[in-house]
């Protein structure tokens, strides 16, 4: 079953995540995204990429049920090396503009994917949740680097510790998103922006991404690897097991 829909129109590739109920990521969906970016990098007809979610949610992050199935034998670092780390690098390294059209809640690894995009256009209904601490984990998927780079270290730590959502309004004021629009205007605005970029210099855009990556995110690959080490530690601790149990039971975790 395909969880990612692809549509190419006028040199703009629209990728829509569609895995009900909350567009949570599993291995199949992540693999589809990796393949889509690999093909887009090679396709001269694709000049701009727009990533969005179907329905009312952009993405709920990693599917907790899939993590639970892995049990005590799951290596969090190996999982990240297979899934989110290469995907984040693909988004940053593809020499084409990548826009996230954030249609609703965006949490955990989905937040990392949105932050890795070059621009974020959000609906008024969007909200951003770091999410990891709620299940006893540390930030991964590049969140530990990308979030403070956009909103500052103090704010990033506050919303990591509190696990409270960042509203679309705050996200705009803090530079987390580039625009906030009415929900019904989101895709029209995102595609219009993408269409404008598609008429620009693809070579110049690619070199600009290289320049900004070098200037602002030169240690991204190292940070992704370190996040994997920390997640391996967090994933083996009792707090994570309690966080997952509480999440599945729909209750507040009791961390000790």
Image (cartoon, rainbow, N blue to C red):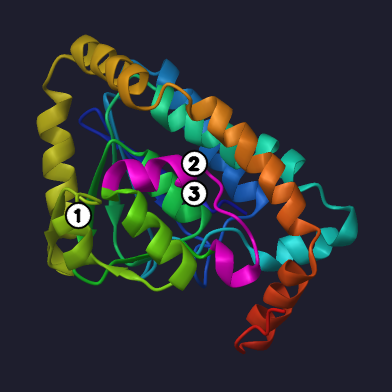
Q: Is 193 on the left-hand or right-hand side of 212?
A: left
58 or 209, nearer to the observer:
209
Residue 228 percent location from the top left of the image: 67, 41
- Residue at position x 73%, y 70% in the image: 239
Element on which disc 1 rests: helix
Separation of residues labelled 2 and 3 (CA atoms): 22 Å
Most frequent secondary structure within the magenta stretch: helix
| Residue beneath the point at 24% across and 17% down | 208
Disc 1 crowd, CA 10 A, few/some/many (<14, 14-19, 20+): some
The spot of residue 109 in percent (x, y) is: 52, 53
Of the residues under marks 1 and 3, which one precedes in the sequence? Answer: 3
Residue 4, disc: 3
Residue 35 coordinates in the image, percent (x, y): 55, 32
- In the rendered image, which residue does mark 1 sit on? 174
- Nearest to the eye among marks 1 and 3: give it: 1
Earlier residue among tags 1 and 2: 2
Residue 136 is one of the magenta-drawn residues: yes
Q: Is residue 99 left or right of residue 105?
A: left
**Considering the image in quadrants, where does the N terminus appear?**
bottom right
């Amino acid at each position: 079953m395909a969880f990612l829909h692809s549509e190419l129109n006028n040199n703009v590739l629209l990728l829509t995540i569609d895995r009900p109920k909350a567009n949570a990521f599993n291995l199949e969906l992540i693999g589809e995204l990796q393949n889509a970016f690999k093909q887009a990098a090679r396709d001269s007809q694709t000049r701009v990429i727009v990533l969005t979610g179907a329905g009312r949610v952009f993405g709920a992050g990693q599917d907790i049920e899939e993590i639970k199935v892995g049990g005590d034998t799951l290596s969090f670092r190996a999982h990240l090396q297979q899934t989110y780390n290469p995907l984040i690098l693909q988004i940053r390294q593809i020499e084409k503009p990548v826009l996230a059209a954030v249609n609703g809640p965006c949490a955990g690894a989905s937040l990392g994917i949105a932050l890795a995009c070059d621009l974020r256009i959000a609906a008024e209904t969007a909200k951003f949740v770091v999410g990891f601490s709620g299940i006893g984990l540390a930030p991964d998927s590049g969140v530990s680097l990308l979030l403070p780079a956009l909103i500052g270290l103090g704010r990033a730590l506050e919303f990591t510790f509190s696990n409270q959502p960042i509203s679309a309004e705050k996200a705009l004021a803090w530079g987390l998103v580039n625009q906030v629009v009415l929900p019904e205007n989101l895709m029209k605005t995102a595609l219009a922006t993408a269409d404008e970029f598609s008429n620009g210099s693809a070579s110049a855009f690619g070199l600009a991404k290289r320049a900004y990556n070098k200037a602002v995110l030169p240690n991204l690959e190292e940070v992704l690897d370190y996040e994997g080490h920390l997640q391996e530690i967090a994933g083996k601790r009792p707090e994570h097991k309690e966080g997952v149990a509480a999440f599945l039971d729909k209750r507040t975790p009791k961390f000790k």
